[in-house]
Image: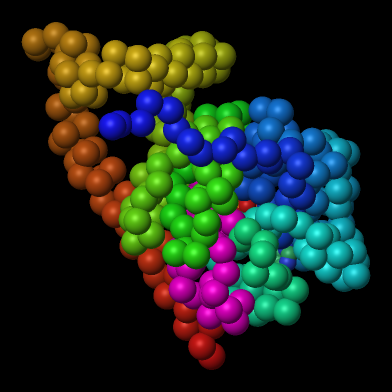
Amino acid sequence: MSQLYSTSITPEISSLRLCFYGAGSMAEAIVRGLIDQGLTAPKQIGMINRQNAARLDELSARYGVLAAFDNESKSVMLGEADIVFLAIKPKDAAEALKQLRHVLRRDQLIVSIIAGLSIHTMESLLGQSMNIVRTMPNTSSTIGLGATGISFSSSVPEGQRSLAEAMFKSVGMTAVVEEHLLDVVTGVSGSGPAYIYYMMEAMIEAGRGRGLSDEAARELTIQTVLGAAHMVKSTNEHPADLRNKVTSPNGTTQAAIETLDAHGFSQAIIHAVGRAADRAAEMGKDIERSATS
Ligand SMILES: NC(=O)C1=CN([C@@H]2O[C@H](COP(=O)(O)OP(=O)(O)OC[C@H]3O[C@@H](n4cnc5c(N)ncnc54)[C@H](O)[C@@H]3O)[C@@H](O)[C@H]2O)C=CC1
Ligand SMILES: O=C(O)[C@@H]1CCC=N1
């Protein structure tokens, strides 16, 4: 008989202590999202940075989160955490994870957002197999509209998988994928917001260049991107069909699309996504090499 209702238990995230190791822009995006969406209280969140005390002060003042400034409080914060988010840059990952080797415990859930860094390399650097959730979020998590790809190490129990998914769902949508696909997720949605911003910059510039005020060019561009994304989502139509409805024969849109084609627009996007995915893999290999050196 098929099951009508899911039997999975709703994870009680608000009772857990979260520690962000690395307090940069992506950590802030997730923290702000979790707090704004009411998933947990600021005092359940601790943040650690390498040396930038002013940044921690700023985050504490802005969100009410806890901050650890000296080595002793960093160790206590890490030790007391139920979930540790690894949110440092790939170039700092090997050194930082080696230092965490004797600090992290097997009963903690490790959530990495580090581009390219594989579960296997994390386990080598940490010196043991651990419950690891490898993710690729994006900065739109800040406003609850993130898109996060997620994979799990084989040991992560079902309850912790649901917990991790619930955390990222609270700041947007999630897609659980096989680990090797996280690099392409990076190319599509991790780096993706930057491609859209880049296009918006160009649209605003073009509007201004032809005489629109700064404000009109900006507002018309924003609403166009917002409306187009909502159209794809709410009509469920293929983007190509929606594009055809805008494109009158021999009209303005056709003229514009032909110009985009002449400049290799689609190919440029396909190459960009592929290059970002390849770059994620390269960064992962670099960390792997430093893990063994
Ligand atoms: N920015 C984005 O759109 C996205 C970033 N990511 C990943 O998130 C991670 C962080 O990226 P961002 O937040 O953009 O970088 P960021 O440079 O803004 O933040 C990294 C933070 O880690 C701190 N840090 C470095 N070494 C440390 C150490 N040993 N101990 C404690 N803190 C340390 C730095 O001081 C810095 O504040 C990266 O691995 C990146 O691949 C993933 C998805 C999207
Ligand atoms: O540019 C980067 O490397 C990171 C990963 C995805 C988005 N930003």
Figure label count: 0
In this image, 270 relative to 10: left or right?
Answer: left
Position of the N terminus, as image quadrant, is top left
Identify the coloring. rainbow
Residue closer to the observer: 287 or 99: 99
Tell which residue pokes out farthest to the front in this image. 1
Position of residue 126 measured from the top left corner of the image (x, y, whole percent) = 61, 77
In front: 42, or 106? Answer: 106
Is 279 or 166 nearer to us in this picture?
A: 166
Residue 57 located within the stretch drawn in magenta = no
Q: Residue furthest bottom?
A: 293
Q: Is residue 81 visible?
A: yes
Residue depicted at 86% across the width and 52% down the height: 67
- Estimate the x, y position of residue 66 in percent, counting from the top left: 86, 48
Q: Which residues are magenta?
A: 111-139
Quadrant of the rendered structure where residue 100 is? bottom right
Residue 279 image offset from top left, x and y in percent = 39, 63
Residue 200, relative to residue 250: is it above or below?
A: below
Q: Is residue 111 above or below residue 7?
A: below
Q: Position of residue 93 (x, y in %)?
A: 60, 70
Rendered residue at 73%/79% (across/down): 102
Determine if the magenta segment contains residue 138: yes
Q: Is residue 54 left or right of residue 154?
A: right
Image-quarter location of ligand 1: bottom right
Answer yes or no: is residue 146 visible.
no
Which residue is painted at 36% across and 45% down in the image?
Answer: 188
Residue beneath the point at 48% across and 19% down: 222
